[in-house]
Image (cartoon, rainbow, N blue to C red):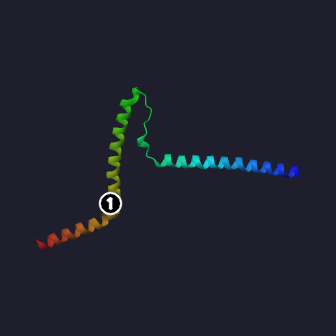
Amino acid sequence: STVRFSFIGQKCQILEDMNRHLEAVLKEKRRLRQRLLKPICQETLPIKADFHKYVVELLTEAVAFIEKLESHLQAVRKIPQIPTFMENLVSSKNRTFCLL
């Protein structure tokens, strides 16, 4: 009878340990999710002073690249509309010549 109770006690201890471990994993998962949802730009990056000039230049280039990329993407989005633009241009030209 005593052996049975000690066996149950061991099982309960193992379950409690597993439960604590799972709670820690879930808590860490919540912290990780919160960190991932928070914008990174609010955190400072440790950059040696020697490299500050290069980081500023790199960020300037990155901003210029993103601006150019946006205009290129807008141009690419208009490609499917080119046949319609051409049809409108031809019909406008024909109407103009008919008026002359």
Percent position of residue 45, x then y: 44, 35
Of the pair 2 and 38, the residue shown nearer to us: 2
Position of 100 with respect to 56 (left or right) is: left
Residue at 79% across, 49% down: 9
The residue indicated by pointer 1 is 78
Residue at 78% across, 50% down: 11
Residue at 41% across, 41% down: 42
Q: Amino acid at mark 1?
A: Lys
Percent position of residue 32, x then y: 54, 46
- Total marks drawn? 1
Secondary structure of residue under mark 1: helix
The residue lying furthest to the right in this view is 1
Residue at 31% across, 52% down: 71
Percent position of residue 15, x then y: 73, 50
Position of 93 with respect to 70 (left or right) is: left
Of the pair 10 and 47, the residue shown nearer to us: 10
Q: Quadrant of residue 98?
A: bottom left
Percent position of residue 80, x then y: 35, 63
Is the residue 46 above or below the residue 63 in the image?
above
Quarter in which the C terminus is drawn: bottom left
Of the pair 16 and 31, the residue shown nearer to us: 16
